[in-house]
Amino acid sequence: MHVQLDGVPSHHLPLLLAAYQHKFGRNVEAMSRHLTDDVAVGWEELGTDLLDDAPPALVAALTGGEQWPSRTLDHLITPDGSPPVRMAVTDETADALDMQWGYVLHQQGIEVISLLHEDIGPVVDWATDPRTAFNDHPAAWSSLDPAPTIRASRGTPPPSAPAASPVQAGTPRPAARR
C-alpha cells in the first residue's frame, strides 16, 4: 500500500490504530483488504473515514473536529493512456519516490519503518491507545528500541484489544511518504 501524503507516525498511527480497534472490529485481515486489496493503485491520503464507528470523543481528540475523506490514486492516467498498475514497494522504488516511512500490518501490531535509517522497525501493539502522541523523528524509530512516544496518551485509554489474526500484506513493503 502506498500513501502519498502525511506519512509521519503522528498522523498515520492514530488513524490506523483507531481504524483497527473500531471500524474493522479488531480484524487485521479486513483492514488489510480495505487498505491494500480494495484499491487499484494506492492512496493519496488516509482520511477520517477510517474513524467510522469510533467513539465521538476519540474522533474529536484525534481530529480536533476536522473531517477529510480518504482519497485513492485510482484516478491516475498513464502517459500512454493505459490503466495504472500497482507497484511493489521495494528499496529501489522507495528511494526513487523519496518515501520516508513504511507501515506493515502484522498480527501483533503495526511495524513502523524509518526508511531513511533501517529496513525494519519496532512494532506498535494494536492495543495502543490511538491518542498516544508518537515521535516523528526518523532516527527515533530504531528496530532495536520500543516504539517512541512523546507522551503516553492524550486521554483515557480504551479497553485492551484481543490478539489479531494473521494477514498476508498485498505488497512486499507497504509504505507511506512523508
Image (cartoon, rainbow, N blue to C red):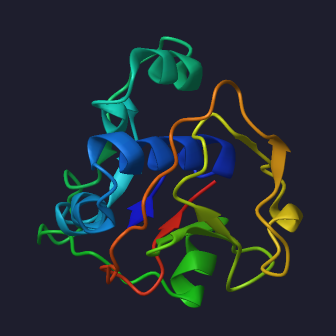
For residue 40, side relative to residue 100 (left or right): left
Residue depicted at x 54% and y 53% = 127
Residue depicted at x 26% and y 69% = 29
The percent coordinates of residue 162 (x first, y second) are 42, 60
As rendered, which of 172 and 122 lies closer to the eye?
A: 122
Q: How many marks?
A: 0
For residue 136, side relative to residue 28 (left or right): right
Quarter holding the N terminus?
A: bottom left
Q: Is residue 99 visible?
A: no
For residue 125, side relative to residue 53 (left or right): right
For residue 162, side relative to residue 155 (left or right): left
Q: Is residue 124 visible?
A: yes
The percent coordinates of residue 85 (x first, y second) are 22, 75
Residue depicted at x 45% and y 73% = 174
Residue depicted at x 70% and y 76% = 121
Compared with 79, 173 (above or below) is below
Compared with 60, 5 (above or below) is below
The percent coordinates of residue 122 (x first, y second) are 71, 73
User: Outermost residue, left direction?
Assistant: 82
User: Outermost residue, top direction?
Assistant: 65
As rendered, which of 175 and 168 lies closer to the eye?
A: 168
As rendered, which of 68 and 154 lies closer to the eye?
A: 154
Tell me the quarter of the picture where residue 34 sits. bottom left
Tell me the quarter of the picture where residue 86 sits. bottom left
The percent coordinates of residue 131 (x first, y second) are 63, 33
As rendered, which of 163 and 27 lies closer to the eye?
A: 163
